Image (tube, grey):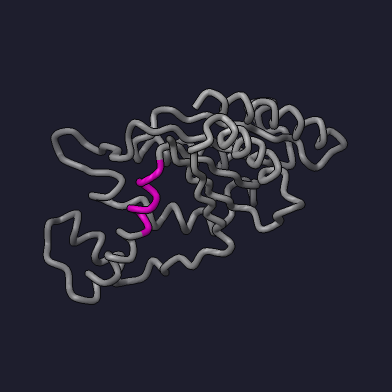
Amino acid sequence: MSTLLYVEASPRKDRSASIEVAQSFVSTFLEKDAINTVENLDLWNTLLPPFDGDTINAKYRVMHGEDPTPEEIAAWDVITKITDQFKAADHYLFSSPMWNFSIPYKLKHYIDVISQPGLTWSFSPETGYEGLVTGKSATLVLARGGEYSSGPVVAAMDFQRTYLEMILGFIGFKDINTVLIEPTLTDAKDSAIAIAKEEAVKLAGQL
């Protein structure tokens, strides 16, 4: 049995290309093994804690081995609970549109919550940074209006794929696959979705 955490970042739901393709991945994953399970984390219906002063102070106390205040402990406990939920999965699926050449703020908020010292990464002067979420796979399903993979000029404007692949690699992922749905703002949208679905189904079948 395997558990898939599906992180959904689009608010458009039934009008979302990234969700439509991601659902093909989810269906294949469930069909592959009757005891596989999927946890759906819809970031638009999830209350995430503000990353405020107590949380930031707790983070730096953790990094420097200092004792946090009671308020900082309470704030850090919330972060730890959400991060533990994230780390409990075997496989991960992220679906996201491109917003302003990057990702929706809800997804960035979630990443800011779970990317924490001692929880998903560590640092030492001798070895540098080390990701702690290891031995797991992640699939990114990314919708974009333009063809950002078509050449170096537009590729330089892509902070969606590059950021997500980088941050997942930073916290320990080695097995990262990316399914692109592009362009979604032209008549080629339906074809792009169909091609992406085929790729998503193939990847899910390999888990």
Residue 112 x/y as whole percent: 41, 55
Identity of the residue drawn at 24% across and 65% down: 58
Residue 3 x/y as whole percent: 45, 41
Main secondary-structure element of the magenta-colored stretch: helix
Residue 139 x/y as whole percent: 53, 35
Residue 198 x/y as whole percent: 69, 26
User: Residue 207 or 149: which is nearer the viewer?
Assistant: 207
Identity of the residue drawn at 28% across and 40% down: 132
Q: Is residue 175 left or right of residue 181?
A: left
User: Residue 83 or 62: which is nearer the viewer?
Assistant: 83
* 186 is higher (above) or lower (below) than 206: below
* 53 is higher (above) or lower (below) than 15: below
Identity of the residue drawn at 40% across and 38% down: 90
Determine which quarter of the picture holds residue 73: bottom left
User: Residue 172 or 26: which is nearer the viewer?
Assistant: 26
Residue 199 is a magenta residue: no
Q: Is residue 180 left or right of residue 194?
A: left
Residue numbers of the magenta segment? 82-89
Quarter of the picture containing the N terminus is: top left
* 69 is higher (above) or lower (below) than 102: below
Q: Is residue 115 left or right of residue 157?
A: left
User: Residue 45 or 30: which is nearer the viewer?
Assistant: 30
